[in-house]
């Protein structure tokens, strides 16, 4: 079922068994979730996915690319949608593998509806969170890109805990110049405080002390 | 001269008379006289001249005569020489054996005789009837090649042979018949030629002597006559040579004939005691022809001691009574070898009835005797075998009459209350009207085919197996054994096989548990989820009745799906009772696929089907055929199960191929090594851990029992494996 307008969240259901697909879809719809169904991993990868928080409910056994392979493929392609596995037969090694690869949940059919709904909700929440974080990170990176090389240098020394005077000495320039650089950094990075800047740096993977 | 004298005398007389008469008329008379004298003189001159001519003539004739005499003498000399030559050649005929040499000498003599420039001798080839040059003088290769083989109807020499007469061509330029050969004649350098054909006493064409002359020439009658003598001599010689040759050949043939037939001839001259032995006889006796030729009674020492007395008696009796005799006896060679011979001899008498000689033929019959012994032994052996085999052995002639019972067959007849000896010569089905396989017996007798059949013979209470073979006399022989035990065992075996098939089936299905679980869990899972959804839909503040109804409908459908799966499995597990019925092969394939689809997908296998539409039905046991398909599919899956194996494709195809339906299962797996392609159908062959190793062998048994075949070959592009099995369509069941 494709939504006629952009939904606020979406669940992708991928199962080669039509009745299962339909049943899961019906269940999720019943609690007001928007669902998109696919009969195979390839269909899913080829599909136009709406850019809203969501998660995927996959059968482990799929024709062509298996569920686990799809999970791996999604990671490689940078698709961050959380994955919930449903399977017709419980296979411990498989489930362990799936969970280690980052699946949200691994359910065996027939499952309790609540279990699925909980997993879906958790998944969506995860995705929402993830999106937020990714957006933030993008912003930070954007800010970082705007810094000049000198400002970059100053920033890394500031979050390292050096005083302006020490920085000035290190870079062979005056304290006043450093203060100006520092101000620019705070502006461009939109940091409110040093602590803020430090957090940002950590997020960006810049070394801090 | 005397006439003139007389005339003069007369004249003087006349004159005197006249003068005495008167001298008056003397002048007139004188004149008259003178006139008469003139006349007379001229007359006399003429006669004189004539005389002189005659004398000259006579003288010339005398000279002529002398010359002719000389010539004749010369001719006689030449002829004498020729005759001497002929005589010499003639004597040589008696002693010389070299035909070629003699022909050349004759040729030389002929050329000399005729004063010819070239010549040649041709012999008639008895096979091709053509004349071939065997000797020549003065010719070059081109001439020899040109006339190397001449047939009767061509060329002038051919003409000579045909008309059996000498042909003389005075001038090749003038003779029309010689026209085609003028060029070769010119090249060889002759203008005239004579051909003298040679014939045997019986008139057979032997050859030709030809002589050639540089200038146009016609040989004289005389020369030709001598030519004939030479020709005759040559013909004699050739004829004689041929006769000698024939005799020699005949002698060789005779000797050869004797050798080949191991027949030898001998003769014994009674008066002198001389014996003649042919070459073969020496061989038969193992004697050296250069060493001994024993006569009677020496020859006895070569005869086998046991036969000696008999030979001696028979021979002496026959000679005494001057009768024919025949003897068969053995000869012993010095090295101990024994030869069997058969001797036939008869006496030869002269006109007065006196015994001249005995002539005989001796044949070496050793091989025949040995062969007869072998046959005899063989017969003994056969009899021994027939008596010793435990089968019942019957012989029938072409009318179906009993000819022979072996020990056991006779026993069987007695068990049935019949006398086997009395049955010989009686027709089998007349004596046993309840004979269950009369039609087959008739078939063997009429069509001369081998038939093996099993029948139950109630009077004996036994199952028998008859092997009936046509025999060379138009009848048949029957080897019969009791197979009641065997039949029982076969029945047991059949039961066991069925049980085994069943066990295999179960074991195979055991492998499918995972797949089965999946197949059942799918619909069950959907049912539960739909149920949950339905409850939620109904317990909403605003219940969605329609959607809830749809959910329930789906649940029902899935419930049915699940039970169908169970049924399918139960169907496959059922013990098959060989219940054959009309089957749609595609439906069967699809049912099996429905069961296995899950298993296959789990293994990442892409399943493709190409099932032909409108295939005719087959008569088959549905369960068994599905077992075959299942087995092939699982084998395909197994072949592609290696970790990371790619590609994983399974193709299942059904199609009609003439009178059969062919089902193909192709995988892209590891394939089967060529050396294993036969072995995989043998029980216990398995490369699968925990596998029973029966699947393929039972699959093949099933297919064969349905009248089809199961085989394997490499898959597409030589990768993977293809299994195919065929089943006859309904119309084509044999």
Image (spheres, coloured by chain):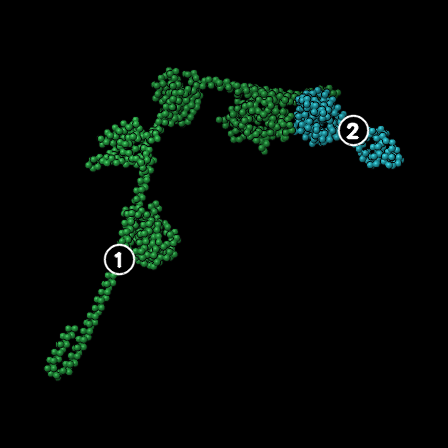
- Left or right of B509? Residue B248 is left
Residue A11 placement (x, y as % from top left)? 72, 26
Neighbourhood count class around disc 2 (C-alpha, 10 Å): few under 14, some 14–19, many 20 upward: few
Q: Which corner quadrant of the image does residue A126 belong to? A: top right
Residue A64 placement (x, y as % from top left)? 65, 29
Q: Nearer the viewer, residue A106 or B714?
A: B714
Mark 2 — residue? A133
Query: Dot 2 lies on which element?
Result: helix
Q: Are marks 1 and 2 in contact (CB under 8 Å)?
A: no
Residue at the spot x=55%, y=26% of the render?
A: B680
* Residue at the extreme right: A176
**In the image, is residue B12 above or below residue B440?**
below
Chain that is cyan in the image: A
- Left or right of B713? Residue A101 is right
Identify the chain of the residue marked 1, using the numbered disc in the image: B
**In the image, is residue B10 above or below residue A163?**
below
Mark 1 — residue? B77
Distance from disc 1 to disc 2, alpha carbons, whole Å, reads 157 Å
Residue A73 placement (x, y as % from top left)? 70, 30
Residue at the spot x=54%, y=20% of the render?
A: B500
Q: Chain B colour?
A: green
Residue at the spot x=69%, y=28% of the render?
A: A70
Q: Is any part of residue B23 visible from this angle?
A: yes
- Left or right of B558? Residue B28 is left
* Residue at the extreme front: B291
- Left or right of B442? Residue A25 is right
Identify the chain of the residue marked 2, using the numbered disc in the image: A
Neighbourhood count class around disc 1 (C-alpha, 10 Å): few under 14, some 14–19, many 20 upward: few
Q: Is any part of residue B706 visible from this angle?
A: no
Residue B675 placement (x, y as % from top left)? 55, 29
User: In the image, are marks 1 and 2 on the same chain?
Assistant: no
């Amino acid at each position: 079922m494709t939504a006629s307008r952009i939904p606020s969240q979406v669940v992708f259901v991928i199962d080669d068994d039509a009745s299962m697909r339909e049943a899961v879809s019906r269940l999720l719809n019943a609690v007001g979730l928007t669902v998109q169904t696919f009969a195979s991993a390839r269909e899913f990868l080829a599909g136009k996915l709406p850019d809203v928080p969501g998660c995927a409910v996959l059968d482990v056994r799929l024709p062509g690319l298996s569920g686990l392979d799809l999970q791996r493929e999604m990671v490689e392609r940078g698709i961050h949608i959380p994955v919930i596995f449903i399977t017709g037969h419980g296979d411990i090694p498989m489930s362990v593998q799936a969970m280690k690869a980052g699946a949200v949940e691994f359910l065996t059919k027939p499952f309790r509806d609540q279990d699925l709904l909980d997993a879906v909700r958790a998944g969506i929440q995860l995705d929402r969170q993830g999106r937020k974080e990714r957006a933030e990170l993008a912003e930070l990176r954007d800010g970082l890109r705007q810094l000049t090389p000198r400002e970059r240098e100053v920033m890394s020394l500031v979050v390292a805990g050096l005083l302006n005077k020490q920085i000035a000495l290190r870079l062979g320039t005056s304290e006043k110049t450093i203060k100006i650089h520092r101000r620019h950094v705070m502006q461009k990075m939109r940091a409110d405080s040093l602590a803020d800047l430090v957090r940002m740096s950590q997020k960006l993977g810049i070394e801090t002390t | 001269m005397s006439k003139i004298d007389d005339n003069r005398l007369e004249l003087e007389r006349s004159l005197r008379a006249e003068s005495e008469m008167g001298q008056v008329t003397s002048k007139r008379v004188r004149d008259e006289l003178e006139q008469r004298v003139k006349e007379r003189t001229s007359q006399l001159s003429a006669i004189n001249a004539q005389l002189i001519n005659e004398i000259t003539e006579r003288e010339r004739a005398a000279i002529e005569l002398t010359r002719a005499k000389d010539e004749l003498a010369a001719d006689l000399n030449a002829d004498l020489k020729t005759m001497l030559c002929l005589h010499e050649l003639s004597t040589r005929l008696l002693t010389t054996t070299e035909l070629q040499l003699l022909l050349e000498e004759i040729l030389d003599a002929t050329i000399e005789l005729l004063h010819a420039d070239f010549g040649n001798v041709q012999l008639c080839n008895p096979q091709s009837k053509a004349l071939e040059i065997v000797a020549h003088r003065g010719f070059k290769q081109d001439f020899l090649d040109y006339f190397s083989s001449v047939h009767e109807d061509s060329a002038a020499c051919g003409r000579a042979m045909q008309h059996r007469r000498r042909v003389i061509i005075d001038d090749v330029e003038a003779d029309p018949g010689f026209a085609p050969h003028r060029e070769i004649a010119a090249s060889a350098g002759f203008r005239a030629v004579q051909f003298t054909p040679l014939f045997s006493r019986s008139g057979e064409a032997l050859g030709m002597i030809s002589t050639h002359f540089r200038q146009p020439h016609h040989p004289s009658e005389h020369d030709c006559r001598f030519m004939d003598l030479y020709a005759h001599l040559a013909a004699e010689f050739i004829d004689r040579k041929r006769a000698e040759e024939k005799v020699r050949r005949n002698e060789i043939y005779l000797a050869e004939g004797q050798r080949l037939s191991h027949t030898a001839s001998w003769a014994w001259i009674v008066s002198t005691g001389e014996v003649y032995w042919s070459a073969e006889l020496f061989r038969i006796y193992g004697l050296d022809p250069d060493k001994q030729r024993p006569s009677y009674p020496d020859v006895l020492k070569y005869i086998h001691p046991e036969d000696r007395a008999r030979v001696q008696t028979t021979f002496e009796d026959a000679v005494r009574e001057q009768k024919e005799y025949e003897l068969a006896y053995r000869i012993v060679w010095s090295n101990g070898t024994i030869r069997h011979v058969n001797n036939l001899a008869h006496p030869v008498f002269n006109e007065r009835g006196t015994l001249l000689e005995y002539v005989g033929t001796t044949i070496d019959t050793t091989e025949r005797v040995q062969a007869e012994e072998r046959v005899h032994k063989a017969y003994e052996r056969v009899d021994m075998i027939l008596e010793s085999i435990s089968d019942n052995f019957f012989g029938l002639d072409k009318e179906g009459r009993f000819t022979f019972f072996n020990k056991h067959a006779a026993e069987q007849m007695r068990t049935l209350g019949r006398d086997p000896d009395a049955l010989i010569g009686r027709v089998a089905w007349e004596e046993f009207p309840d004979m269950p396989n009369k039609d087959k017996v008739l078939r063997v007798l009429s069509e001369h085919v081998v038939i093996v059949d099993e029948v139950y013979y109630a009077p004996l209470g036994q199952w028998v197996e008859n092997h009936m073979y046509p025999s060379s006399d138009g009848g048949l022989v029957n080897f019969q054994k009791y197979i009641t035990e065997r039949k029982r065992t076969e029945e047991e075996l059949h039961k066991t096989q069925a049980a085994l098939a069943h066990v295999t089936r179960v074991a195979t299905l055991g492998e499918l548990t995972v797949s089965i679980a999946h197949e059942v869990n799918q619909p069950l899972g959907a049912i539960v989820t739909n149920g949950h959804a339905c409850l939620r839909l109904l317990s909403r503040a605003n219940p969605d009745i329609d959607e809830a109804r749809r959910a329930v409908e789906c649940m029902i459908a899935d419930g049915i799906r699940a039970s169908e799966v169970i049924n399918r499995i139960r169907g496959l597990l059922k013990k098959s009772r060989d219940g054959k019925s009309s089957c749609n092969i595609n439906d069967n394939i699809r049912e099996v696929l429905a069961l296995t689809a899950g298993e296959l997908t789990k293994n990442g296998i892409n399943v493709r089907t190409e099932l032909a539409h409108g295939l005719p039905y087959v008569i088959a046991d549905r369960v068994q055929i599905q077992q075959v398909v299942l087995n092939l599919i699982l084998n395909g899956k197994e072949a592609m199960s290696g970790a990371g194996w790619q590609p994983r494709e399974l193709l299942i195809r059904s199609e009609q191929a003439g009178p059969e339906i062919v089902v193909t299962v192709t995988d892209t797996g590891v394939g089967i090594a060529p050396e294993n392609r036969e072995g995989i159908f043998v029980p216990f062959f398995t490369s699968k851990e925990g596998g029973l190793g029966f699947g393929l062998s039972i699959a093949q048994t099933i297919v064969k029992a349905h009248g089809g075949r199961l085989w394997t070959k490499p898959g597409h592009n030589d990768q993977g494996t293809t299994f195919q099995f065929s089943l006859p369509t309904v119309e084509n069941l044999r």
